[in-house]
Amino acid sequence: MVGSDPPGPVRVVDGNALAGMLAGALAVDATSLPLTCGHCGARFVLAQTVVEREPASALVRCRSCTHTLLTLAEEPDGLVVRMGTMELRFPR
Ligand SMILES: [Zn+2]
């Protein structure tokens, strides 16, 4: 949403403003990314999660409480990663 900026130092801009912030972040080994379970608060790296793997998809669960953290699906146009209500698409 771009438009009425709230008062103070916060500027409301569109997602293009994230290009620089995410450029390096998306070029790492994802399995080493630290995460926190939004359900129980457990902290670990992605490699330490419990993964229910199928040929073209995976469901990633918290190793502490088994809450679903994210799902991944290989689709014809690329990889789809869903976290909560957010869906990220990584085109081929
Ligand atoms: Zn948990």
Image (cartoon, grey):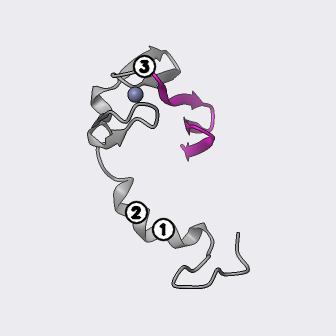
Start and end of the magenta stretch?
Answer: 67-92
Category of crowding for the residue at label 2, using alpha-carbon neighbours closer than 10 angstroms: few (below 14), some (14–19), many (at least 20): few
Q: Quadrant of residue 34?
A: top left
Which numbered disc, 3 or 2, marks the residue that appears first in the sequence? 2
Q: CA distance from mark 3 to mark 1?
A: 33 Å
Per the image, label 3 sits on a secondary structure element best described as loop
Q: Quadrant of residue 83?
A: top right
Tags 3 and 1 in contact by the CB under 8 Å rule? no
Does ligand 1 reach within 8 Å of label 3's beta carbon? yes
Per the image, label 1 sits on a secondary structure element best described as helix
Where residue 8 sits: x, y (%)? 55, 85
Task: Assess whether residue 65 is covered by the magenta stretch.
Answer: no
In-image side of 56 versus 5 (left or right):
left
Residue at (30% x, 49% y) in the render: 28
Please name the residue that numbered disc 2 is placed on.
Answer: 23
For residue 19, the mark is: 1
Residue at (57% x, 45% y) in the render: 88
Tags 2 and 1 in contact by the CB under 8 Å rule? yes
Q: Please state which amino acid type lies under the numbered disc 3.
A: Thr
The dominant secondary structure in magenta is strand
Q: CA distance from mark 2 to mark 1?
A: 6 Å
